[in-house]
Amino acid sequence: MAVKTIPAPRDEPVGVSLAQVARETDDVRTIVTDKARAIQAITGQVKILALNALIEAARAGEHGRGFSVVAQEVRAVGAQVEQIATTLEAELAGRVASVQGMMRSLTETAQGERLVDLALNAVELIDRNLYERTCDVRWWATDAAIVDCVAAPSPERAAHATERLGVILSAYTVYLDLWICDAAGTVVANGRPGRFPGVRGASVAGEEWFRRAAALPSGDAYGAAEVTRRPLLNNAQAATYCASIRAGGRANGAPLGVLAIHFDWEPQAKAIVAGVRVAPQDQDRTRVLLVDAGGRVLAASDGHGVLADVLRLDTRGRTGGFDHDPQAGLLTAFHRTPGYETYAGLGWYGVIQQQDPGRKARSR
């Protein structure tokens, strides 16, 4: 069974984008500045001509008196035009700068909200997939071969249960292995003994997921463990889900053991974070992550820090949102899992980090 996908938001903007408006605003500011300076240059020439005319009028004496008056008026008009041009440039530059600031804010908000939607899309995809895992484990725990394996243990029944688990694994390719554990926490059968020969006979009584499963109130309940590397599964990354095996396969039957199913986390999670629809021009400066409730990195589109790094995510009590760090030049968008159907989730977050255009990607 492959990971299900849902349609992602479009990459291509429809109609005029805020970025295009911002570029047009930049062009307007350049035009205003250029034209104002051109007017100032012309008025400067007019003032020089007026000065020259005054000099020549003075030389002409009485005959140049009328021309002197005209030259003075021309110089005054030139000064007024220069003042208007200077004031116009200052006022328009201020207004354009204000518009540019608003455009930057609108652009950042639009981009941040889009990234929040993509972060939500990523965590919803994985939760929908993990919801199916909770259904699988509760369903398979009622299988007659699995129940019989712990109800009346024998080599024959263990062999039959192993065969049955192998059939399930052949149809559900998202699992690493399935384990049947008795009430004492010993694995009595697994679906891939050839691939994982150290599993059968191993004790998992000290594992948190086993203790949770052993304490489940009924067969309708399930337990979930955080993603970790499982030594018995060749140190593969696994998300473990478990349910109690009960007498007669009934939800209210006496508990007999535990069924644990190990979801093959790494390839499935990679498919989620790599599949987020980021615009091609933004891919090199964008990082998509899944993190747990404590910020531990569960998956990353660049592959760095998985199950090792902790992301400092300041949600400030928000379910979803974004923050921009101008000093680091980094926009961080996030959304907490909303859960899916009866799966409340484990408090995970989808996170998208995007470096400002022109800034180098941060070293991990």
Image (cartoon, rainbow, N blue to C red):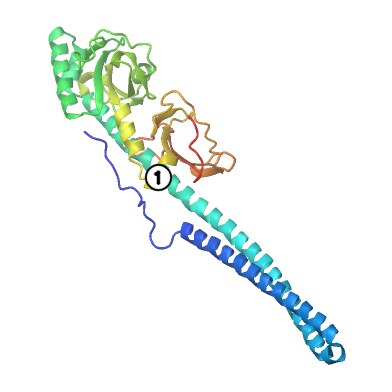
Q: Is residue 288 placed above or below 165 in the rendered structure? A: below
Q: Is residue 110 placed above or below 235 in the rendered structure? A: below
Q: Is residue 276 placed above or below 46 in the rendered structure? A: above
Of residues 321 and 261, the one nearer the viewer is: 321
Q: Where does the image place residue 6, in percent across and percent down from the top left?
A: 30, 45
Q: Where does the image place residue 183, in percent across and percent down from the top left?
A: 29, 12
Query: Tag 1, which secondary structure?
Result: helix
Q: Is residue 168 left or right of residue 98?
A: left
Q: Which residue is mark 1?
A: 118
Three-letter residue code for mark 1: Leu
Quarter assignment of residue 32? bottom right
Residue at the right extreme?
62
Quarter assignment of residue 235? top left
Tally of numbered tags:
1
Q: Is residue 346 left or right of residue 80?
A: left
Of residues 194 and 363, the one nearer the viewer is: 363
Q: Where does the image place residue 302, in percent across and percent down from the top left?
A: 39, 32
